[in-house]
Structure formats: C-alpha cells, structure tokens
Amino acid sequence: MSLEADMLARLKAVARHPAARGLADDAAVLGWPLGQDLVATHDMLAEGVHFTPDCPPADIGWKLAAVNLSDLAAMGARPVGALMGAGIGNARGTDWAAELLRGLMQCLDAYDTPLLGGDTIRSGPTSVLSLTALGQSAPGTALARSGATDADDLWVSGTIGDAGLGLRIAQGGPGASALLKRYRRPTPRLALGLALSGVASAAMDVSDGLLIDAARLAAASGLAADISAAAIPLSPDARASGVPVAELATLGDDYELIFAAPPAARAKIEAAATQARTPICRIGRLHAGAGLTLDGATPAALGYQHR
Amino acid sequence: MSLEADMLARLKAVARHPAARGLADDAAVLGWPLGQDLVATHDMLAEGVHFTPDCPPADIGWKLAAVNLSDLAAMGARPVGALMGAGIGNARGTDWAAELLRGLMQCLDAYDTPLLGGDTIRSGPTSVLSLTALGQSAPGTALARSGATDADDLWVSGTIGDAGLGLRIAQGGPGASALLKRYRRPTPRLALGLALSGVASAAMDVSDGLLIDAARLAAASGLAADISAAAIPLSPDARASGVPVAELATLGDDYELIFAAPPAARAKIEAAATQARTPICRIGRLHAGAGLTLDGATPAALGYQHR
C-alpha cells in the first residue's frame, strides 16, 4: 500500500466529524453557526527551516496544529475545524507519517478541533506541511493588532524565551528538557484569547520574539511601546539558563499572547485570565509616538525579522 | 529585502478584500452569509511530483487555484475565498514567486474568489504549494459522490484526455500547444457545479482519470457503472493524437465534472449546462452491482491509483 493510501485510511479513522463526510467527497461541508464570523488562518512548517530532520514527527504534528490554533487565539476566535496538507518527504515511511498524524490529533483533540479534510502527497526531498485552521467569532468581536490606544497597558501570557532556549537544545546545546518541550509543543492560548475578546483593545501571538512582536502591535495601532525588563515573565528554567532577559525577549516560538487594554480594564483583564486559567503579566504600556523601548532605551535587537 | 518580505508586499497589494484585513492580523475574518453551509477543501502541489521544475510559475499558480476551485465545483459550492501556502524552493528568486502569485490571481480573479491570507516560507530544495478554498452552499444542497441511484445517467463536462496528453508534452513529447495549456491551466467547472446543485444526484471532479473516477462515484453510490466509449467527448486535438479513447479515459488532470442524474432529469441537466455555458455529454449509466465496464467489458486499466 502506498503512503498516500495508508494515510488516507488513518485520516478516515480520525476525521469522524460529520462535516468531514468520511473524507469520501471532494470537500468538507460544515453547517455554519448563524451570524458568526469565519476566522481563517493558514501556516506552513518545512523540514530544515521550522523543524530539524531528527525532530520526532509527533512533535511536528503537534506544532503544525498549535501554531495555527495560536493564530485563532490571537483573534479571540473559537476553533471549529482544521484541514491539513501533509507533504511527506520521499525518505519518510508510513510510520513517520502516522506519528505526524498522531501528534497533530493530540493537539487538535486537546482543543476540541475536528480534522475536516486535507491532502497527503509526496513532497520531494524534504517534508513540507500546511494547515488551515477555521474558527468562529461573534460578529465584529475578532481581535486585531491595530485597536490599542494611547496609555493602554501591555500584557503577555505565560513565560517568555523558553521556546527559544528549547531551539538551542534541539540544535544540540545543553538545557532542561522542559525547554525543549516548550519549543516543540507550544500551547495555543485559545481560552485566554476567547476570554479577552471584547475586553482587550488589541492582540497578537508572539512568534518571532516578544520585543519585535510588541513593536508590531504598537506600530499597527500607531503607537510606541515601552516594556519593563523586570516585568517580563520568565520560567525558573529560563532564569537558570543565565541568558539575559533582554536576549530572551528576542527569541521566537513562544506562541504566547501579547495584548493591550486600558488601565481601567485591569480588573476585567485579570478576571479573563483567571477564567481562562492562564497566567498573565503586565509588562509595559503604549504611548504616543513610534518604536519600542526596553526600560526606556532602544534595545540592541528586537527579534527575528524577515528582511 | 527577503523573498518573504517581497511576497508579503505583493500579497498585500492583491488581498484587497476587507476580510483579509490588509494581511495585518493573524487571521482573516469574514462575515458569513446567514444560513449558508461552509464548504472547504485543501490540496497541495509539489515540484517534481505535480509540476516539472521548468513549468512556468504563473501556470503553477493558476493550477494551484484551479484544482482547489474544481473541488468546490464538484460540491456545487460558490467560492468565497482562498488562503495560499507558498513554500518557495531555495533556488527560486522573487521573480519566480511573483509569477506564481500572478498566475494564482489570474485564476482566482477569473472566478471571483478573493485571496484572504496565507503564508510564504522557504520550503527547502523544492517548492511545495498549498491552498485552501472556502465556498458556500445552501443548507443541505452540497453535492456528494454517494447520491446516485440505480439507472441514473452518467454525464461528463468538456472533453477528456487533453490534459493527460498535455502532460506528455510537458515531459518532452510532441503535441498541440492547446493540450499543454489544458494540462497547465485547467478550467474549474464552477458555473456548472452550481447549476447542478439540486439537479444532479451525485458529482465529483475528474482528477485521476475518467474511468477510475467514474468507478469511484459508482462505488460511493453502491452501484456499477457502464460507459460507452463512443460517447466520451474528445477534442479535435485528442482525436488527432491517435491515442485510443480507452487510453485517454485513463489519463488524469482533466478537472472536468462527472455527475449522475435520473433519466427523467435529462431536460433539467441540459438546461443547467446551457445556463452554465458548459458543454456536457451523457456517457453511460449506473446500475445495480459493482465495478465499471467500458462498452460492457472490463477495461485493461482505469487510471491513476494510489496503491
């Protein structure tokens, strides 16, 4: 049996939502909740670029789902389904593809997101994966990067820099295994995003680094940002790494949410985070102007930029 | 400027639908038409597998859109938007990527489908492309492969085998340039699919070969199919090729629609095709049993199968 046929059988076993139609038709058909907006995002992961060839395939599958669900979280949307494009490298066998799917489903199941369809192909020398995540939000309530106003607080969820330190471990460096897990199995902050909808003034997810992404949110809102280094939340492992906070805040792959809200909304923000059982920290503020400062000074580096 | 940044600027220039939010946020947000079902499909194309390295990138872009829109057509859905994953091979420059996008937009514009978002990455040694097409259909009206009943007619749109002959030209063989175009720039039969919704009993698109896909539609409906070789529509170029019709009917990439309907609905089917300005031919019938016959005999080959 070909890899494609083997995968189709495995996909049929897990794509049990009626909208997937048993993967028997040319497309999925989903009754849409009356009056809800559709939120849609599509991100890819490529071998040698976004994951190393020796990365466990179940972790790749998890991350493929998680980075897309993180985009829905940043919009305050509730996931309703996913479609996967599995471009499997020529050297990979059915076991590798099955593990990829297992990790993907672990993440999708953890966030109640049915797999609705997709495509499996042989992609060539390396594996290249794509996913579309579909979500719903009440009309006009989706969050944006551009909604913040002067004097808004800047907040972030979770801890910063763990995934970037995990990447160094994946590349052969030393470090705590919890950091590697943070890199390979990021947590999409869906409950927090939902709870922030209608409360936060602006939001996005942190994928390229806290400082660069905070600068982007500020720029989209036509404002400047100032962040307090001491307020940036760090895990015990990140503190123990000895890497300065100004550097941790430039590392990518956190998939935490950064968001803004007026100071008057602090109690509501705290309540939203409690409801979502997600730790958050207030790390700075937005103000008139442009650019980003850390403790009032321009940082040497912001993070990963597509130059 | 990096290829990713160059592409983002180009994408922002063409993703002008409000739902795309200027590609400034983490996801697209689309007001959904009240009460309409969501139809979603996701297909990939890989260099060296689905297109040759020397294929003009604009043609690749067209085909990426067309094969996904063809899936919507097969469901009788109206397209509402697309998200593209552009995995650009390391050796390709911004010109190649810009041409890919140009061809993609030619096809999306031709079928009134806004580009809502997506992702551009460096994919590794070869290019691997993905697309999600989103469509709408009135509740419960989406077509399926499984709806045909005993004694239904079997119909097909357009002409058969042209694209397969075009593939041989792409691989260096002789032939008419119109055939190459049929391979590289397939026509998604969206108007026909829409017109068949509520009239046809079953439908799918022909991607792996007329015979194999007719056999799949029959099997999904729990029936057998018999096709009349003389009734299979051929273009003048396909006739001139000298390739027997039994072979043409096993070639892939036609992206025509094959569909079923009761004999009592023939006038309605003809009217639907006229309304859609799409030529159709009645090529056979479905009956109790299993399998597929061509002029009453089992063909030597059916088409491309994922073994």
Image (cartoon, coloured by chain):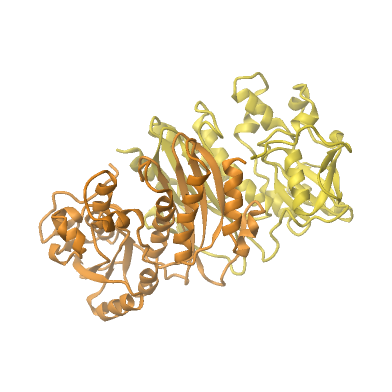
Chain colours: A orange, B yellow
**Residue drawn 75% across the image and 36% down it:** B302
Quarter occupied by residue B165: top right
Task: Classify residue B261 as left or right of residue B27.
Answer: right
**Residue B99 percent across, percent down from the top left:** 46, 34
Tell which of A198 and B170 is nearer to you.
B170
**Residue B81 percent across, percent down from the top left:** 54, 53
Q: Is residue A128 above or below residue A71?
A: above
Asked if residue A193 can be seen in this view, the reply is yes
Looking at the figure, which quarter contains the N terminus of chain A? top right
Task: Classify residue A269 as left or right of residue B66.
Answer: left
Tell which of B232 and B275 is nearer to you.
B232
**Residue drawn 25% across the image and 78% down it:** A266
Looking at the figure, which quarter contains the C terminus of chain A? top left
**Residue A268 percent across, percent down from the top left:** 30, 80
Task: Classify residue A288 as left or right of residue A95.
Answer: left
**Residue B251 percent across, percent down from the top left:** 70, 33
Tell which of A202 and A54 is nearer to you.
A54
Q: How many marks?
A: 0
Quarter occupied by residue B214: top right
Asked if residue A293 can be seen in this view, the reply is no
Tell which of B181 and B140 is nearer to you.
B140
**Residue drawn 36% across the image and 74% down it:** A276
